[in-house]
Structure formats: C-alpha cells, structure tokens
Image (spheres, rainbow, N blue to C red):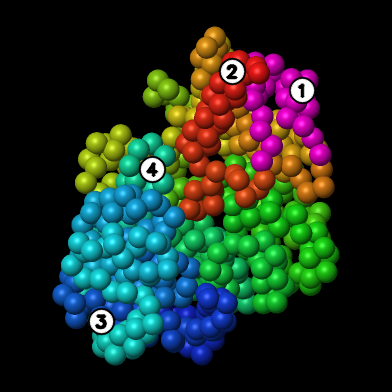
Amino acid sequence: MNRNTNLGYFFAASVARFPDKVAVIDLYGGVERQVTYSELDERADRIAGLLQSRGIEAGQRVGMIMGNRVEFLEVFFGAMRAGAIPVAINTRLARDTLKFILEDAECHAVFVEPEAHPDALAVCASVPERICVDASYEKLRDASPRLLEPPPLAADAQAFQPYTSGSTGLPKGAMMTHAGMLWYVEYNQRYWPTSPEERGLIALPLFHKNAMRGTVKPVLFAGGSFVLMPGYEPRAYLDALARYRCTYSRGVAAIFTMFLQHREALNALDLSALKGLTIGSAVVTHELMDEVERAIPGVKVGESYGLTEGGSPFRTPLDGRPVPRGSPGVQAPEYEVRLVDSDGSDRQDEGELWLKSPYNCVGYHKRPDITRAKLVDGWLRTGDIFRRDAQGFYYFKTRIDDMFSCGGENIYPKEVEDLLFRHPAVANAVVAPVPHAVKGYVPAAFVVLKHGENATAGEIREYCLQNGPKYAHPRYVEIISEAELPLNGAGKIDRNLAREQLASRVRHQATASEAPQA
C-alpha cells in the first residue's frame, strides 16, 4: 500500500506492462543511452537503498545539483521511494544562491555532478553525505541494495521541494505533497490522456516544471517514451525531433524563436511524426505561434500556463471549442478559480488569479510569513493578473509587481511587448521600466530581429508611437542578438536582470551624451 501513496512509484504500472520498453533515450555527453522501464525502476530502487544505507531518513531533504541526464530521474524518484525529499537546484544559479538553498533546505545529503556547476563541489562541503555523480557513480549505485518496501508516510507527507526563481527576493522552497502530485498525474491522464505511443522531446532543464510536469510524468505514467537532451541548441533540437520521430515537445518561447532561424533544416528534415508543440512558462505571442505552425505544416501549437506551486488551472475545453490565440484555455475541471480585485472582492472580468486544487503547495519551507501571504483558506494567490472573456477563456495580462506608473499612466510590460511583436521585423522583445527624471519611469526594450530582417531602434520606436498609446512607447530601444537575451536557468526571460541591464544602458547613454565633445 505504501507504494500507491508514494510519488516515487507513480510509473509502477508502466513497469509492469512494458518492462523491456525504452522509457528514456538519454543524449547526455553526445552518446545515446537507452533506458528501459525495468532498468529505470531498478535504478530508483537502488538509489533509495543507497540513501537508507547512508542513514538518510524519511522526511530529510536530499539536494540535487545535476544536469539533464537519466541519473537525475533515478535520484529524484529514488529519493522519494526512501521517503526523503529531493531538492532539485537550478544549476545556473550563482554560488552563493546554491549555498543558500542547500542550507535553507537543511539537506542531509546531496547528489552533485561536478560538471553541472563550476562551484558545485565547493558549495556542498558542509552537507554530511555527498554523492558524486561522476565515473564512480554507476558502480556505487549498482552495488547498493534495492529498496524492498518504502517507509510509511503521512497522508500529507511532502514529496519534493522546488525553489522558486526568487524574482521577489531570495528563492523560497515550495512544499509539494505526494497526494497532490499523484492526484495531478492521474487527473491529467483522465482528461487529456497520453498514449503509450507518444514520444516527447525534452530540452529544458529537468529541475523546471515545464519538463517534469509537462513531459516526464505524463509520459512515464502512460508508458510512452521521451528523448532527453543535455541542453537546448536549435539545430540539434530539430535533428532530434526528426531522428527519433518525436510526436510532441514543450518549451519556452525562446526555444521556438531560435529554431525558426534554421529554415533550411526545417524544410529538409522529416518532421511528419510531430503533431503538437506547447509553448509556456513565459509570455507567448500569437505571431510566434502562427509562424511555428506555418514553418511545420500539420503541427498544432498551443499555449500553456502553470505555476510551480499550483499546476495548470487552464486547459483546452473538453467540448472541443478551439482556444483563441493569446489564451491558455478555460478553467480546468476539478480546479477552483477566482479573479480578485485589489480590495479583495471577486470579479468576473479581470483580477489577480487565485486558485485551489489538491495540487497546491501546502506552504513555504521555514517561511510562515510568505505562507500566510500566499495561501489564504486553501486558496493560492498567484500574483498574476488575468482577464476572462464572455466565452470563459482566460488571458494573462501581467504580474502584479511588473506594472509601473509612467507619468500617472499605468503600463504593463506585456502590452508594450505585444505591440513590439506586431512589427514585421521583430522576433523577440523584453520590456522593463527605467528611471526618468520627469515621468518617474518609462518603458525601455531589448529587441531581437528576425533572421534576414533589418530595422533600426529609431524605426521601432516610431512604429510604437504610431501604433500604440504614445505614453507607452519605449523611450529606449536596443537591438540585440538572441544569445544576449537576459534569461534565467529555466530559459525564461529574467525580468529583474532585464531591468538592471536596461537601466545601466540608459545611464551609460545619458552619461555619454553629457560628456564634453572633443
């Protein structure tokens, strides 16, 4: 019975049905490794046995500083089988932040891949049990006893502890439960079933919900398979889609924007097996979705919205209605949703999204203040502003803390970005407020041009003046390359970093213009 209530065993039925079927095709290190369901199951059992042999008890946290490789999965689910709580850490974080998370989580053990971060080994020095994922790892794992039976867990036992990106301060650990996560896996299969014939492709980091919740769990639960890339590179991504006959993939907008620059490959490769692509985890424009569908005929591109702490409350309608561009869908079944005004009253048209479901985190580790602020009578306050139309479709507008005032006018960065995306030469853009002596703050923008297109910063500013509210036009525009976009470790736009960089560029420009001329 303990197995049925432990997330570490969620794919046990697939192991029983398809023991010799390939579950994961791992491309780590440029060498293809195929791992079957029975092999993945045994590896997770041996990791659980290894942790128990090292004295790790149920409820203790196990850090993970690891890249995209099948070992990540066996550690993640193996730790839960032992009753431990895995803490998968973003490998692109600065050394001090890595150290903070390990200490904040009070990790008793850590699996560390030296190649995943230049300071990985150093920051783990104070963790009692350190297991190095290097040449010695496989031998250590295979010599460990298989765990025969998981320890009993409370009904509300914590399964794992993801840390948020820390956009409003230091990262905070969300406490996710076995019961809530198992509910979500079964819920997904009940309403939007994944077939055993499906093959996904993952290029985003496994520590990110887009990869784990969007592909790993539904595919393994259904008995399908997926290809795991060590990281994203546009041409390699397209080659993998074709070579492995992948049927779908999920990613952030930057993934799709970048591969669209490889038109020759798109035209030459056989992508006939590909049926669907989902873009989420960041702002998505309908122009990008349309362009992807034109580039890969027969592929349906959808938009998703989800939270680390609350899952995905909006989905494609079960009655078959098409989802309008710009919307992630209607309220999902078994989810409760509210739109709440700044005064705390419910609204039907627009407001902060509050949601409730068994998925919701139960709090934030050692942060009762944030728990009280974010969780109200079982409702999760998302901090995201949504609009709902007359047909019940929801549209993301902005983060509460993204809005800024420009000379008394409220401006949402997404609205300016949407305007920029309508320019025929613009492939990507990010907008942030920068200080202004008169207005307080004004919009500024980084812009990436489409391959082969030309436009100047002045032309783009003029376009915004002519086609949008004059008060919202970006006062500063800088054309950058796709590689220069300020992204975080999950591949999403880092708005704090964008704001800092834009403010710095504007200050530099002002200083240069004030310098005496020779």
Residue 299 pos. (x, y %): 75, 60
- Between residues 209 and 372, which one lies in front from this camera angle? 209
Q: Residues within 10 Å of mark 3 (few under 14, many from 20)?
A: many
Residue drawn where x is 79% and y is 63% of the image:
266
Measured in 3D between alpha carbons, the distance from the residue under mark 3 to the one under mark 1, in whole angstroms, is: 64 Å
Residue drawn where x is 63% and y is 31% of the image:
445
Q: Is residue 449 magenta?
A: no
Tell which tag, 3 or 2, sits nearer the viewer: 2
Residue 314 pos. (x, y %): 55, 47
- Between residues 409 and 348, which one lies in front from this camera angle? 409
Q: Is residue 37 left or right of residue 53?
A: right
Residue drawn where x is 16% and y is 75% of the image:
55
Residue that carries the numbered disc 3 in the rendered image: 49
Residue that carries the numbered disc 4 in the rendered image: 166
- The kind of residue tagged 1 is Glu
Tell which tag, 3 or 1, sits nearer the viewer: 1
Secondary structure at numbered mark 2: loop
Residue that carries the numbered disc 2 in the rendered image: 515
Secondary structure at numbered mark 1: helix
For marks 4 and 3, the one nearer the N-term is: 3
Q: Which residues are magenta?
A: 454-480
Name the mark on residue 462.
1
